[in-house]
Image (cartoon, coloured by chain):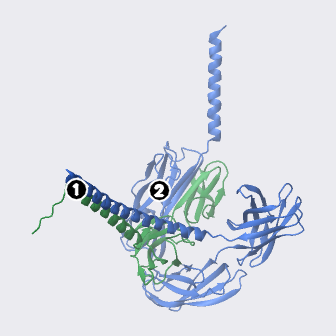
Amino acid sequence: MKKIKITKKEKLAIEEIVVVLGVIILIFLAINFYSRLSLISPVNGEKTIDRTPEFSWSGKCNEYILLVDDSNNFDSPILEISLKGNTYIPEKEFGFGDYYWKIKAFDGEKWVESKIESFKVESFIALKLENEEVRNIGNTPAKVDVLKKDESGWSIVGAAVLSVNEILVYEEGDGLYKAEQNE
Amino acid sequence: MDYTKLNKMNKTKIIGIVLFFIVLGVLFSNNVEAIGISPGRTTVNFEPGLQQDVEFIIFNSEQKDMNVVIYVEGELSEFVSLKNPMLEFNSGEESKPSSYRVNLPEDLEPGTHEAKIVAREVPKDYAHDGAFVGATAAVVTQLHVIVPYPGKYAKVEIKVSETGEGQPIVFLVPVSNFGTQDIVKAKGIIDIYGPTNEKIVTIETNEKGVLSKERVELVGSWDSKEINPGKYFAKVAVTYDGEVASAETIFDYGNLQIDILEVNVKDFRLGEIAKFNILVQNLWSDTINDVFAEMVVLDKQGDEVIRFKSASEDIPGGSKEELVAYWDTEGIKADTYGGMLIVHYEDKTTEKQIKTIVSQNSIKVEFVGATANVVAMSAEGGNKDILVLILFVLVGINVGWFVYFKKKNAISKNSEGNI
């Protein structure tokens, strides 16, 4: 059998070629991974106080259908919309609770489906007192009780339901403004 | 000179100035209090003797130093014990988790029972209740314990799902059975009313059974092909084994939108005031108030020549209206100008790119067609092109290496031969 002799320079050249080929393979793998249909956000199991969370996914298809349902069999989706891009912010606010979501994509020949992931939309009750104004800075309408203190303790002297970002003007002085969910 | 007296005077002055600034600081300091809690409600189905830990998060929305006292109120307060009755926040701390334990009794009356876990902001130096003055904020996370009613008892809701344009409107009717017995058949009838309260259509949902303490969703759909965008009212009556439960909702179909139809200027002479009649249409079924147009005129370099607005008008649903705006053309040259016509309404705008041709005796306004979609598409394509380019460059480098080493090899062989 004839023995092939490789010079040092040839060896170096082969090494360089292997490195370049490796980089090419890595780029191909990255492109392939980027083209794969996978869900990005909301992250699986995420709890959010954003009632219109942004949905995003990876994939290189021309047409997608985004489905969101409170049941993982998707028999009555709360959101079902055809899209061209890879992100979507819902127009309607979600109610509070657990949701499942998935993407259907048309790859030019057939429809393929992503895996199913879940997220939870939680209520957020928050008040901000500034410049003699009480503002509902939560994500849901809040019932705000106005309490004043006298000798017998705190007692309710008024109440209002504030929509998100709505304000209640108060008079200067003591007072406790207590907010709770009203939805 | 009496330096002692002078020093005394200076000291008094300095103290006075310092005090003045302290008072100013106190007067103009913006005392903001903000506190949040999540979730706002936790619902638990009653089980005798149930023990459960419930977690919640308190938010320091202003990220400042504050203390929070936590206490329990309401009917079920004796069955709730807190993990931390006080939390301390330092500035920069956005949120802190906490929890409470529910120890339910062996028996409760049917219905919904409640405890309120209150988180109240108090100053850092808070010692005891009533030791501070000023308005304070408190937020509540509710605990709802649901005890089933004897027999069949349904609670219903109605929601409208989000679908694309031209797709049927889908109504979701969740039915929760808070009774001890299963519901065999539940079916909904949905009446839909228009903006002037006229009944438009009645649709039926599918029919389903609901097990005790379970929840199902009934579905009904409405073909939206002939529906105008606008506000609608839906009322559902769910009949379940001879009983009726109802719910209602107001929903929007389509988007609130004003369309710009045409712009014309009549009886114009250069140097005089031009009257722009901007014809717009309200595509929404309800009146849109305070609609006004804004016109931006740009020269060939893209610099703003003028910006002027029309008066505001209320435009009834579905109708067309002219918005009138004026431009004083004194000192303006006869030329073709670029620009933008923007119609403002509610918190929205409709924009059209325009070309304004100004001559001695006329002004003509044309709409220029350009879409953001085209820009977005080319941007996406560009990304792919870069990847392909990188690939070609790498292949090129590879080939280059081959050629380079082959040539170098040949040269070294030749030089070895020459020797």
> In which chain is the residue bearing label 2?
B
Question: Is residue A53 among the parts visible in the rendering?
Answer: no
Side of B304 relative to B410 (left or right):
right
- Does B31 appear above or below A70? above
Give the structural element (helix, strand or loop) at label 1.
helix
Q: Specify the farthest residue to the top.
A: B1
Mark 1 neighbour class, 10 Å CA radius: few under 14, some 14 to 19, many 20 or more: few
- Classify residue B376 by image quadrant: bottom right
Residue position for label 1 = B413
Residue position for label 2 = B58
Type of amino acid at the residue the image marks with label 1: Lys
Q: Colour of chain B?
A: blue
Numbered marks: total: 2
Type of amino acid at the residue the image marks with label 2: Ile
Residue B207: x, y in percent? 50, 91
Residue B178: x, y in percent? 46, 80
Q: Nearer the viewer, residue B274 or B117?
A: B274
Tell me which residue sits at (47%, 71%) in the image.
A97
